[in-house]
Amino acid sequence: MQIDVAKRLQHTEEYYFSKKLREIDELNRQGARVINLGIGSPDLPPHPEVIETLNTNAQLPNVHGYQNYKGVPALRQAVADWYQRYYNATFNPNTEILPLIGSKEGIVHICMTYLQEGDQALIPNPGYPAYAAAVRLSGAEAITYNLTQEKNWLIDLDELKKQDLSKVKLMWINYPHMPTGASAPDAFYQELIQFAKEHNILICHDNPYSFILTDTPKSIMSIAGAKDVAIELNSLSKSSNMAGWRIGVLVGAEERINQVLRFKSNMDSGMFLPVQLAAAKALQLDASWYADLNKIYAERRQQVYEIMDLLACTYQKDQVGLFVWARIPEKYKNGYALSDAVLEKSRVFITPGGIFGDKGDQYIRISLCATVEVLKESIQRIKDSF
């Protein structure tokens, strides 16, 4: 019996890393012992107090039922305090904050809330592949805007204004940018807010990397007028080492929160209460938590620079976030070719930049989610085989 998949899936492929991990698993079964430097899944644990909060509350008898779709007040208040303390952005915890079971799920929630057939959404190239997939799943059309190293990976708004934007309802942006590690200054956000007002476009800012190797965390929501035209996703996956816990948040004007909640409330039944309380504890940690975390990532980044040097790649040292993004030498056709060569010769996996769009074809990306010892072993393997 043949049952066709829905039209919405016919042009949506399995996520690249899902397929690549199966290939790596097979190599490991054959004894290869591949070192995976591709995925940004933090290898460090959350703060001990966060784990203790989870353990303590999980043992209580009255915390195991369904939870409110909007999250418990303690978590929403912790998010509001966190945004005020680190971003200087003010939100009403009762009406302008929506906890999510991961911010990646939030990307789908937002697209399904606002987009349908006939609509268009702007997505970055290079950029996180989940944006394009979520737009396609909604039935809308994804229109890419190109980012270049020459413009510091910032959006060329003057170029965008030359296009027909009449069908564009929302625009995905992501700074600090993944995969390039570029940061956006306040002046850029100000121009973007004005652009959104002029063209009646909802700006959707995906902001999970703002605490990683940055001096000052930034949010578009701290800029005057942002709440009129923008919403923001944030996450504890990177900043609190809680990727597998699936804790995200959406912040924005009350109207937007209620609109997304209409979709979300039909898709899940709320987050496990002890997880919410542990997330609140993570958000209450003082700045020393982020400083200590970044010391570790800074040390690891020096090792990744050495890998890039061995591969004759070029990179900018002012990039931030959980990865190092680098341009490949001309002798390789593209990042896929270099990635395959390193995997074959050294049994080290690095990410080809082309998975983030064709503007990433000539780049590779290496994650900082590996210990210094693992990175040094990777360096030695590459020295021995290249």
Image (tube, rainbow, N blue to C red):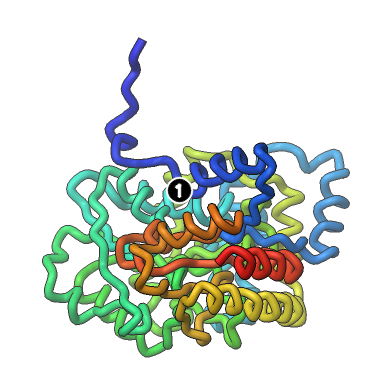
Given residues 52 and 237, the one toward you in this image is 237
**Is 140 drawn above or below residue 64 in the view shown?**
below
Measured as percent of width and height from the top left, residue 82 is found at 64, 74
Residue drawn 39% across the image and 77% down it: 226
Given residues 112 and 38, the one toward you in this image is 38
Measured as percent of width and height from the top left, residue 360 is found at 36, 66
Answer with left or right where residue 259 lies relative to residue 274: left
Corner quadrant of residue 353: bottom left
Quadrant of image for the N terminus: top left
Measured as percent of width and height from the top left, residue 125 is found at 32, 65
**Is 51 drawn above or below residue 283 in the view shown?**
above
Residue drawn 60% across the image and 38% down it: 26
Residue type of the residue flagged with mark 1: Tyr
Corner quadrant of residue 281: bottom right
Answer with left or right where residue 145 lies relative to residue 300: left
Given residues 283 and 212, the one toward you in this image is 212
Q: Residue furthest bottom?
A: 187
Q: Secondary structure at mark 1?
A: helix
Quadrant of image for the C terminus: bottom right
Measured as percent of width and height from the top left, residue 302 is found at 64, 80
Q: Is residue 172 visible?
A: no
Q: Mark 1 — residue?
A: 16
Answer with left or right where residue 339 lies relative to residue 118: right
Given residues 13 and 84, the one toward you in this image is 13
Residue drawn 63% across the image and 60% down it: 237
Tag count: 1
Residue drawn 61% across the image and 80% down it: 213
**Is 2 drawn above or below residue 312 in the view shown?**
above
Q: How many other residues sit within 10 Å of disc 1, few (<14), some (14-19) or many (≥20)?
A: few
**Is 339 drawn above or below residue 192 in the view shown?**
above
Q: Residue furthest top?
A: 1
Corner quadrant of residue 349: bottom right
